[in-house]
Image (spheres, rainbow, N blue to C red):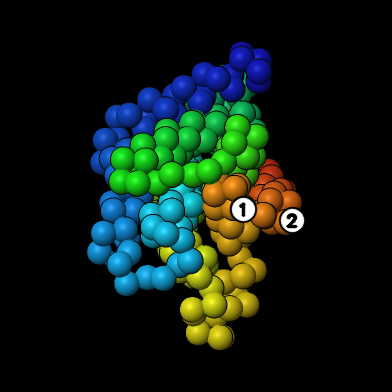
């Protein structure tokens, strides 16, 4: 089987595994929705975020949390493949690590775009009204998709590093909380001074602020480019690490 033909087959396999793992699928889809409802209805009345409705401020942060957590599940799936020995069977059919990981990353991107759609659906139902035009919508989705791909690739590298799926799941816990010390749910200026530097200069913040500004038709400056630079850097790190890690785990 050629590498080009193997790619969609492996992506389809990863999607089928997701459907069979109903618990993980429901968590990836429902958790961001529950966080959105939790913040809007329980905390939204007490948070002053500079927007008429708190849901308007919170949605971009929930989208990034949804994207990062869902992409991080790739680590568990890659670690599971290595543990079960299926990788050796693929190698016997001349399917290399590059295509195996690409299949996982492609499937992760598709899963997470579906989760993003679910978050948007609920957000519109509870009052989210963006002012973006078609070009701004396309730019916001492009930044969000780039972040999903970068996080999925990084997660695949973590899956190669982890010895068991249980160890890889620790990465999902870390990624789940990554958007909290950012501008996802409250303005950074309201945080303690010692946290400002990290909150402003971690990967999630420029992605969130780019998506928020684009969807709300606000000036974004160079933030989308900063966000894409973060995504490109994470992707390059993941690619550089994945090759040696795959060879080490399969030799």
Which of discs 2 and 1 lies nearer the camera? The answer is 1
Q: Is residue 240 left or right of residue 188?
A: right
Which percent across, then down, holds residue 201?
64, 68
Name the residue carrying label 2: 222
Query: How many neighbours does mark 1 have within 10 angstroms: few (below 14), some (14-19), or many (20 or more)?
Result: few
Q: Position of residue 40 (x, y in %)?
A: 31, 58
Q: Position of residue 42 (x, y in %)?
A: 25, 64
Position above or below: 3 against 240? above
Which residue has dot 1 on it? 218
Q: Is residue 177 visible?
A: yes
Quarter of image, res 27: top left
Which of these two is toward me, 236 or 147? Answer: 147
Contact flag, marks 2 and 1 (Cβ < 8 Å)? no
Relative side of 200 to 13, left or right: right
Q: Which residue is drawn at the image coordinates 61% and 15% (left, top)?
A: 5
At x 36%, y 32%, the residue is: 18
Residue at 56 percent across and 86 percent down: it is: 194
Q: Nearer the viewer, residue 8 or 119?
A: 119
What residue sits 57% from the left and 71% below the top?
Answer: 199
Q: What kind of element bears circle 1?
A: loop
């Amino acid at each position: 089987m050629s590498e080009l033909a193997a790619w969609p087959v492996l992506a389809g396999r990863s999607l089928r595994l997701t459907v069979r793992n109903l618990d993980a699928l429901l968590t990836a889809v429902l958790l961001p929705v529950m966080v959105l409802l939790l913040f809007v209805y329980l905390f939204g009345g007490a948070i002053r975020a500079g927007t008429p409705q708190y849901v308007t401020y919170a949605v971009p942060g929930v989208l990034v949390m949804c994207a990062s957590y869902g992409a991080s599940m790739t680590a568990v799936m890659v670690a599971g493949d290595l543990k079960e020995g299926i990788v050796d069977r693929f190698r016997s059919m001349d399917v290399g690590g590059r295509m195996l990981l690409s299949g996982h990353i492609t499937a992760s991107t598709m899963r997470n775009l579906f989760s993003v759609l679910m978050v948007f659906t609920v957000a519109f139902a509870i009052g989210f009204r963006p002012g973006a035009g078609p070009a701004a919508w396309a730019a916001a989705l492009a930044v969000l998709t780039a972040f999903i791909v970068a996080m999925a690739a990084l997660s695949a590298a973590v899956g190669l590093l982890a010895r068991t799926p249980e160890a890889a799941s620790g990465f999902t816990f870390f990624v789940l909380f990554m958007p909290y010390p950012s501008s996802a749910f409250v303005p950074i200026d309201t945080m303690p001074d010692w946290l400002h530097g990290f909150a402003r200069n971690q990967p999630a913040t420029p992605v969130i602020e780019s998506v928020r500004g684009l969807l709300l038709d606000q000036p974004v400056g160079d933030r989308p480019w900063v966000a894409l630079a973060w995504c490109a850097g994470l992707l390059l790190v993941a690619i550089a690490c994945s090759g040696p890690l795959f060879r080490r785990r399969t030799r």
